[in-house]
Image (cartoon, rainbow, N blue to C red):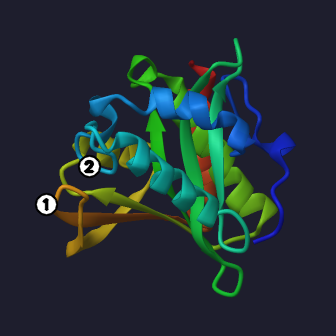
Amino acid sequence: MQAINTDLLRGQHVYLALLTKDYEPQLRALARDERLWEFTKTLLINESYDAQFDAYIAKAYSHTGADGQAFVIHRTSDGAVIGMTRFYDGSEEHKRVNIGYTWYVPDVWGQVYNKECKLLMLQYAFETWGLQRVGFEVAHQNLRSQKAVEKIGGTREGTLRKFMLRPDGSIRHTVLFSIIDDEWPEVKRKLTAFVSMG
């Protein structure tokens, strides 16, 4: 994928910054909240948390470059770090990318921030990169995230059964969603209206 211009990822409520090492101490502290990982079990809050977090951040950096980019999400009003998200598994050849690995601190759940973040990222994918498809992969138990993707216009495509094992050994099925370029104008209209209402 082409290099990211973060000036195009600034909104009224959030802005996205490229993940750098400077953010790691703050992200390590914010991510130490079991509520964030209730369904994904990406990080287990136990004695091995720091090692798990190091591996998590290493994977985030691995999505930086040809096939994606990891971001830190800031609240525009005060600059506070409120979460992380990524473009990943991108393909210029096939004109597609996924958005995921998204989390927010719990005190901003259900507010405008996720909608505007997705608006900015979708706009970048479709209008700057000229892609045809943006995908979302959601854990089967994470109904909150599934509803959030549907709310922004994602179409449920099906479930990949027994798709992966979580760090705690449990099985995760993955629910697939997508938005395609034909749908983008209407998705953009609705998302812009949601965001304008705050």
Crowd class of label 1 (few under 14; some 14 to 19; many from 20; radius 10 Å): few
Crowd class of label 2 (few under 14; some 14 to 19; many from 20; radius 10 Å): some
Q: Secondary structure at mark 2?
A: loop
Q: Position of residue 97 (x, y in %)?
A: 59, 69
Q: Which amino acid does the dot numbered 1 rest on?
A: Ser
Is the C-beta separation of discs 1 and 2 under 8 Å?
Answer: yes
Q: Position of residue 20 (x, y in %)?
A: 72, 45
**What is the number of the mark on residue 41?**
2
Q: Is residue 12 above or below residue 159?
A: above
**What is the number of the mark on residue 13?**
none
Q: Which amino acid does the dot numbered 2 rest on?
A: Lys
Q: Quadrant of the C terminus?
A: top right
**What is the number of the mark on residue 170?**
1
Residue at 66% over, 28% down: 74
Residue at 65% over, 65% down: 68
Residue extending farthest to the left is 170
Based on the displayed image, in which of its 4 quarters is residue 2 positioned? bottom right
Q: Is residue 109 above or below residue 175?
A: above
Q: Secondary structure at mark 1?
A: loop
Closer to the camera in the image, 149 or 51 = 51
Could you tell which of marks 1 and 2 lies nearer the N-terminus? 2
